[in-house]
Image (cartoon, helix red, strand yellow):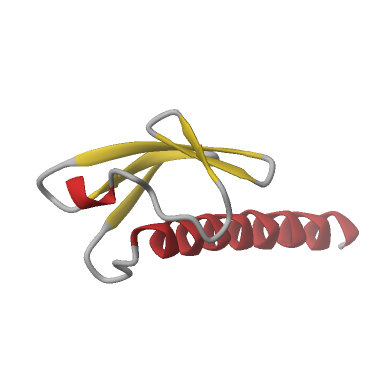
Amino acid sequence: MLYEQVLKIRQRKKTLQREFIEASIKLMFFAVEDIKIEFTNPREGIVSNGEKAISFRVDGEKIFLDGKMIKPGESHPGFSLL
């Protein structure tokens, strides 16, 4: 019983982390409906608009797009590429 509760909590934590990462990236691109986010693992993936793609990686609270760290509230300098 307790083990099942722990598993549910861990799964919810992973879901919340993923939702937070997706929301953070969408805010950086100012294009919530225009981009697609695909995870290759829980902390890395690709952001695309169907024509071009940019990789992302999350390290703690830092988000890297195309290998460049993006500060909270800052847009990606290459978002116009998407």
**Quadrant that contains the N terminus:** bottom right
x 48%, y 55%: residue:
74
| Horizontal relation, residue 34 to residue 41: left or right | left
Residue 27 percent location from the top left of the image: 43, 64
Number of callouts? 0
x 37%, y 32%: residue:
66
Task: Determine the residue located farthest toward the right in the rendered image.
Answer: 2
| Horizontal relation, residue 50 to residue 46: left or right | left
Task: Determine the residue located farthest toward the bottom in the rendered image.
Answer: 33
Task: Determine the residue located farthest toward the left in the rendered image.
Answer: 51
x 67%, y 47%: residue:
61
Q: Is residue 13 visible?
A: yes
**Above or below, comparing residue 42 to residue 79 in the picture:** above
Considering depth in this image, is 75 or 51 the residue closer to the camera? 75
Residue 82 percent location from the top left of the image: 19, 50
Residue 36 percent location from the top left of the image: 27, 56
| Horizontal relation, residue 43 to residue 75: left or right | right
**Above or below, comparing residue 70 to residue 11 in the picture:** above
Residue 63 percent location from the top left of the image: 54, 43
Considering depth in this image, is 71 or 18 the residue closer to the camera? 71
Considering depth in this image, is 19 or 78 the residue closer to the camera? 78
Q: Is residue 82 visible?
A: no
x 67%, y 63%: residue:
12
**Above or below, comparing residue 75 to residue 39 in the picture:** below
| Horizontal relation, residue 67 to residue 4: left or right | left
